[in-house]
Image (cartoon, rainbow, N blue to C red):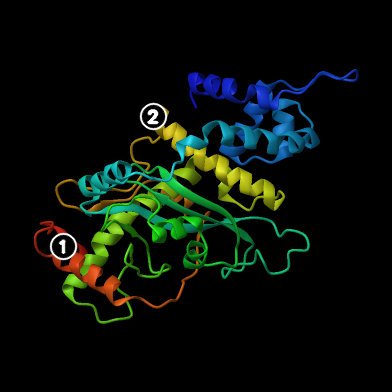
Amino acid sequence: MSEDCFNFLLDKVSDKITKQDTTCRAALTPKIKLQITLRFLATGNSLKSLSYEFRVAPCSISKFLPDVLIAIYEALKDYIQVPNTEECWREIMDGFNDKCNFPMCGGAIDGKHVQIRCPAHSGSDYYNYKGTFSIVLLAVCDSELKFRYINVGHYGRASDGGVFARSNFKKKLEEMSLNAPEGMVLLGDQAFPLTDYLMTPYSRRLNLSKKQKIFNYRLCRARRTVENAFGVLVSKFRILEKPIALLAETVDKIIKTCCVLHNWLKTRSSTYIEPGLIDEDNSETGDLVEGSWRTIAQNSFRPLGNFSGNHSRNAHRIREHYTDYFVGQGRLEWQDRMIY
């Protein structure tokens, strides 16, 4: 983070995290609180380690940390905005069409487990299918790798599709209260149900035709945006790399703050994503060049389990339309090589 960005953020949060001096000691300044919090998020260092580095007691850090996280999120929350106008949706769809060659796409959706230490008296609520304890982060991102919607706090035992099914975002999509253009779709993996507005791959358990394999490739290629967004998030905020030994409600705040900082820095800093960090296609051959985040974050976020549900006939027809389009008018000259 540049000095200008830090000072901008400090100005935004100072009033909310300033405490009065007491007769016993001077209060910590907003600057040192913000420095420690950002250092904690960026490095994942323990409170004890931060205590040595900044000469502040671990108990003091644990006390002010939630307040600073809340202040950062409240100051920057407008950087994560769910699209609610047709113009905004079309801007996102144009981005996916231009960058990923997937028309009418309003976002890529995915969910990840953020690992935590087992909360006291939580039973199996946070216990996930991978055998660890976690909190779920569900997110929709655009082609610029910015989060457009996040849902944080569900127990680790939940699936991607299950979290999405209970989300307010899904409800608003189905009520058409977000003003999404007719025909807009989100892109998900096999963990999500196929619906009229959510395209998922053909099951690999089937004997897929060539054009079905091409559809899966094209969907996977466009969905790489959300994988890249998660990868960048972990590579920049190392607190997410390993189990977080704090209260679950504090972990919720950490996740939300990391996401909003990601969007803010992606907007303000041209050097936030350095060359080689994210997956990219070779512009001439279409070959995938994997980003360095994959070596950093491969053991951090865990994918969520699958969601089983019924698929409507219309959803199948929409997917078949895309399947035909990708081998016809929307064909890429090098796509056939990618399925063998």
Q: Is residue 323 left or right of residue 237?
A: left
Q: Earlier in the sequence, mark 2 or mark 1?
A: 2
Q: Marks 2/1: CA distance?
A: 35 Å
- Residue at 37% x, 35% y is 274
Quadrant placement of the C terminus? bottom left
Placement of 333 over or under 129, stated as above or below:
above
Q: Which residue is mark 2?
A: 271
Identify the amino acid type marked 1: Phe
Q: Nearer the viewer, residue 262 or 49?
A: 262
Quarter-of-image position of residue 53: top right
Q: Secondary structure at mark 1?
A: helix
Placement of 235 over or under 118, stated as above or below:
above
Horizontal and vertical percent position of residue 249 = 68, 49
How many neighbours does mark 1 have within 10 angstroms: few (below 14), some (14-19), or many (20 or more)? many
Q: Which residue is mark 1?
A: 326
Horizontal and vertical percent position of residue 74 = 58, 34
Identify the amino acid type marked 2: Thr
